[in-house]
Image (spheres, grey):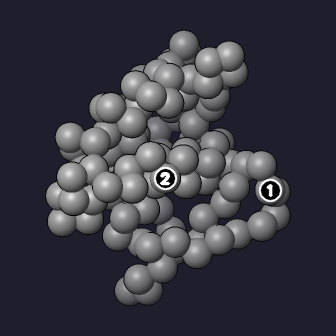
Amino acid sequence: MDDRIEVLNVGQPGKTYRADRAKYEEMRRVLLSVLPAAPPGLTVAAVNDAVRPQVSQALFPGGAACGWWVKCVHLDLEARGILARATAPVRLWRVEPAPAPS
C-alpha cells in the first residue's frame, strides 16, 4: 500500500496534493465520527476540540498538527461532496455516508 494519498481541495478544482495516508485516514475517520449529519453543523473550533482527544496519539502526539489535518481532510471531503459548510462562522456537517478512501 502506498504511504501517500491524493487529496483534493475544494478551493482549487482539478488540482491534487499528496498527503500522508495514515494521518489522512485517521483524521477522516475521526472527523466523520464527530460531525453531525445535518446543518447547522459544528464550528471549526468545535471540530478541532472534538477530534483532538480521539485521534491516535502515535500519529498525532498531544494533538500535534490536528488543526492542519482537519483542514486538509475537510477540504478534500468537501470537494468530494461528503461534507458541506456554511459561513459566518464556518460550520461543517456530513452530507452523506462516506465511501471508503481510495
Q: Where is residue 10 in the image (x, y as percent from the top left)?
A: 73, 49
Query: On residue 12, which mark appears?
Result: 1
Question: What residue is drawn where x is 27% and y is 59%?
Answer: 60
Question: What residue is drawn where x is 20% and y is 40%?
Answer: 53
Q: Which residue lies furthest to the bottom in this view?
A: 1
Element at label 1: loop
Which residue bears the numbered disc 2? 68
Q: Can residue 56 be seen in this view?
A: no
Question: Residue type at mark 1?
Answer: Gln
Q: In this view, does 22 lie to the left or right of 19?
A: left
Question: Residue type at mark 2?
Answer: Trp
Quadrant hosting residue 33: top left
How busy is the neighbourhood of tag 1: few (under 14 within 10 Å), some, or many (20 plus)? Answer: few
Question: Marks 2 and 1: which is nearer the front?
Answer: 2
Q: In this view, does 44 lie above or below 80?
A: above
Residue closer to the observer: 87 or 67: 67
Q: Where is residue 85 in the image (x, y as percent from the top left)?
A: 63, 28
Q: In this view, does 48 lie to the left or right of 40?
A: left
Query: On residue 20, which mark appears?
Result: none
